[in-house]
Amino acid sequence: MSYGSRWANKRSSGIKNNYDVDDEELLSIEGGEYFLPSADKDIERLQMQHFLFRYIWDGNFTSPIHDNFIDGGVKVLDIQCGSGIYITDLATQYPTSTFIGVDDDEAHDTFDFVSQRFFTAMSVNKWEMFILPEIVRVLKPNSFFELMEMPAWSNMGPVTKQILKSFDEYLETINVHRTEPLQLEQILKLSGLVKDIHCYSKTTHLWRGMVGQLLFRNQLQKIESWKSGLCEYLKISEKHFNSMTETMQDEIINYKTSLTTY
């Protein structure tokens, strides 16, 4: 799960546990923008991303709701469900509960558990004024929700740092104003809408092991899907861009780059 931590609980103390583990189309919705896969290739990437983070996190959630699933009858909402792989995986695992993946929802006090992943392509203001209140609105009292995000990579080489920085800057030029994942904890605390906030993180070394290699490849595919726009923004050729991404692969090993998800 990305950005090394997960959040829980409606209307609901901040505990952090750290664990070390060895193109898209821009769509507009009320309240902001988000990404959905626009091609089969990207759907495959999102599906691979799901299974990688399920392995890294040893499951699909950290909220204390497993026993509820075993009892059955739980209602789950996956917001901005993308390819639908997360909600489908949960539904297969817990067939006696109800799982809904949506892009928008009008329900009130309906769901026992809400999950939202990789949705920082929104400003702080939109999180405060729109997204968080909407999550709380559709949740039952004393229920749970989780957010999963990833911040910048750690121990980056110069070319890796340049590409990721340019990627963020390019998104700004197309009106995608991202919220730093670490800001989400503060937003939750200051909202007055949430209690029992828990933050968990897991770090994956991109430079070693099969999971690290697959996760690096997965994240690189996301960047490469914006190659045309990035080349134009950086004023470089695709050949030069490809050379930079090849250098990234060497830097990941030489600088021992890692990625933390929250």
Image (tube, rainbow, N blue to C red):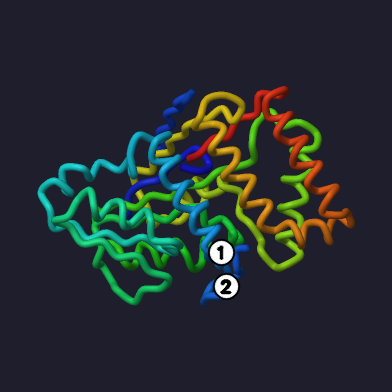
Residue 147 marker? none
The reply, left or right, for residue 67 in relation to residue 190 is left
Q: Position of residue 153 (x, y in %)?
A: 64, 36
Identify the residue at image location x=49%, y=23%: 22
> Is 131 placed above or below 142 here?
below
Q: To which residue does mark 2 refer?
A: 27
Residue linked to disc 1? 35
Classed neighbour count for the residue bearing mark 2: other residues with Cα under 10 Å, few (<14), some (14–19), many (≥20) = few
Using the rendered image of the protein, determine whether residue 182 is visible from the camera's viewpoint.
no
Name the residue nearer the viewer: 201 or 136.
201
In depth, the one of 229 and 164 nearer the eye is: 229
Residue 62 versus residue 39 in the image, above or below: above
Q: Could you tell me how many numbered marks the image carries?
A: 2
The tag earlier along the polypeptide, 2 or 1, is 2
Q: Residue furthest left?
A: 71
The crowding category of the residue bearing disc 1, from other C-alpha atoms within 10 Å (few below 14, some 14 to 19, many at least 20), is: some
Identify the residue at horizontal 76%, vertical 62% (top origin): 229
Depth check: 218 or 167 in front? Answer: 218
Q: Picture coordinates of residue 93 (x, y %)?
A: 22, 48
Is residue 145 in view from this perspective?
A: yes
Q: Position of residue 226 (x, y in %)?
A: 70, 58
Q: Secondary structure at mark 2?
A: strand
Amino acid type shown at disc 1 = Phe
Q: Amino acid at mark 2?
A: Leu
Which residue sits at x=54%, y=37%?
A: 214
Q: Would residue 67 be found to the left or right of residue 175 on screen?
A: left
Camera-side residue: 6 or 205?
A: 205
Label 1 sits on a secondary structure element that is strand
- Mark 2 vs 1: CB contact within 8 A: yes
Q: Residue at x 73, y 61 (%)?
A: 172
